[in-house]
Image: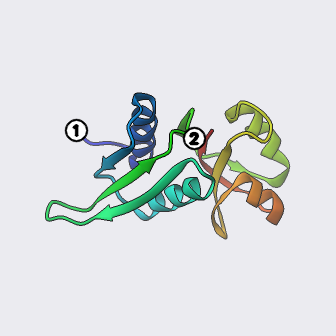
């Protein structure tokens, strides 16, 4: 079976393991995008540290969970948004004002919607977490 979106797979694993009350998740999906999204989620306090485990079958990621995630998912299709459209998508994907993050890809790399507002730039929506 082939998976269409490795980032969606990792976020689904994280959400399911959080609901089960587990402390860590190990996944075979490993890419620069996944690591950057995990880095943002770690900086915002949704996941703990993560490390890359190297073995002969391919590298895997070990992610420590903190129990702070209610819901996380990718955004499909990846809407291209302008600075003036942030509020519309915040209402669509986040449950309340100033609660949770939307991760977007900009010309300055991956940022949260709060950082993109401060820098006054738009981009493509990647994922959300609260």
Residue at the left extreme of this rendering:
56
Q: Residues within 10 Å of mark 2 (few under 14, many from 20)?
A: some
Give the colour scheme shown: rainbow
Q: Which mark is residue 78?
A: none
Q: Residues within 10 Å of mark 1 (few under 14, many from 20)?
A: few
Mark found first going from the N terminus, 1 or 2 = 1
Q: Secondary structure at mark 1?
A: loop
Residue 125 against residue 122 in the figure, above or below: above
Horizontal side, residue 56 vs residue 11: left or right: left
Q: Position of residue 49 (x, y in %)?
A: 46, 58
Query: Looking at the rendering, in which quadrant would you find the C terminus?
Result: top right
Q: Position of residue 39 (x, y in %)?
A: 53, 60
Q: Position of residue 56 (x, y in %)?
A: 14, 65
Give me the residue at 42% from left, 50% from top.
Answer: 64
Query: Looking at the rendering, in which quadrant would you find the N terminus?
Result: top left
Q: Which mark is residue 75?
A: 2
Horizontal side, residue 100 vs residue 13: left or right: right
Horizontal side, residue 61 vs residue 119: left or right: left
Residue denoted by label 1: 1
Between 49 and 105, which is closer to the camera in this rendering? 49
Q: Secondary structure at mark 2?
A: loop
Dividing the picture into quadrants, the one containing residue 107 is bottom right
Q: Position of residue 93 (x, y in %)?
A: 67, 34
Residue at the right extreme of this rendering:
84
Between 97 and 91, which is closer to the camera in this rendering? 97
Residue 71 against residue 11 in the figure, above or below: above
């Amino acid at each position: 079976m082939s998976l269409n979106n490795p980032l969606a797979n990792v976020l689904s694993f994280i959400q399911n393991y959080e609901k089960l009350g587990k402390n860590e998740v190990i996944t075979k999906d490993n890419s620069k995008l996944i690591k950057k999204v995990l880095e943002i989620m770690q900086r915002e306090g949704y996941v703990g540290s993560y490390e890359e485990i190297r073995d002969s079958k391919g590298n895997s990621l070990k992610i420590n969970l903190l129990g702070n995630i209610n819901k996380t998912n990718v955004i499909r299709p990846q809407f291209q948004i302008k600075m003036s459209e942030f509020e519309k998508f915040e209402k669509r994907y986040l449950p309340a004002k100033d609660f949770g993050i939307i991760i977007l890809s900009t010309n300055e790399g991956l940022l949260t919607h709060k950082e993109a507002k401060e820098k006054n730039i738009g981009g493509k929506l990647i994922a959300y977490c609260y």
